[in-house]
């Protein structure tokens, strides 16, 4: 009985397809976990919302596509700070009154220290 041999397909296209799928998965995870929030479109960010803490005016916005938030704080014209919580919490201690601001990726702002209210 004759043996029928089936020609083997090259593995290069298959390997390339698997590589593309893995890379797309990694890029998606990076962007949507919050770590790559700076690369997301401006339209994915919500509106700035003001939160008053003692004499500080803090503006916070949250990204609707990923786990990320940004905050800008001002104490008159004397002091200011910026927080970017991209996937992990961000914290800063202010120079003016020693208050410690912590921003979570979901947009929650916590304040510890003197004059925290």
Image (cartoon, rainbow, N blue to C red):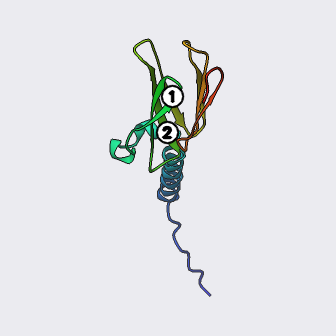
| 94 and 28: which is toward the camera | 94
Residue 8 lies, in percent from the top left, at 53, 66
Compared with 23, 93 (above or below) is above
Residue 29 lies, in percent from the top left, at 54, 48
Identify the element where label 1 is drawn.
Answer: strand
Residue 1 lies, in percent from the top left, at 62, 88
Name the image quarter holding the C terminus: top right
Compared with 51, 54 (above or below) is above
Q: Residue furthest right?
A: 113
Q: Residue furthest bottom?
A: 1
Identify the element where label 2 is drawn.
Answer: strand
Q: What mark, if any, has residue 107 been given in the picture? A: none
Compared with 84, 65 (above or below) is below
Crowd band around label 1 with a 10 angstrom C-alpha radius: few (<14), some (14–19), many (20+): some
Q: What mark, if any, has residue 83 been given in the picture? A: 1
| 52 and 35: which is toward the camera | 52
Crowd band around label 2 with a 10 angstrom C-alpha radius: few (<14), some (14–19), many (20+): many
| 83 and 79: which is toward the camera | 79
Residue 16 lies, in percent from the top left, at 48, 53
Q: Is tag 1's residue or tag 2's residue first in the polypeptide sequence?
A: 2
Q: Are marks 1 and 2 in contact (CB under 8 Å)?
A: yes
Q: What mark, if any, has residue 69 been given in the picture? A: 2
Horizontally, is 35 left or right of 111 in the view? Answer: left
Q: Residue at x 39, y 44 (%)?
A: 45
Q: Residue at x 46, y 40 (%)?
A: 37
Q: Residue at x 48, y 31 (%)?
A: 52
Horizontally, is 44 left or right of 34 in the view? Answer: left
């Amino acid at each position: 009985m004759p043996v029928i041999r089936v020609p083997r397909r090259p593995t290069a296209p298959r390997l390339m397809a698997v590589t593309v799928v893995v890379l797309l998965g990694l890029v998606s995870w990076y962007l949507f976990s919050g770590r790559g929030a700076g690369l997301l479109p401006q339209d994915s960010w919500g509106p700035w919302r003001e939160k008053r803490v003692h004499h500080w005016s803090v503006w916070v916005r949250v990204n609707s596509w990923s786990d990320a938030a940004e905050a800008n704080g001002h104490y008159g014209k004397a002091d200011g700070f910026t927080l970017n919580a991209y996937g992990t919490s961000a914290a800063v201690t202010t120079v003016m009154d020693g208050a410690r601001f912590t921003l979570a990726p979901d947009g929650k702002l916590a304040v510890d220290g003197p004059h925290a209210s």
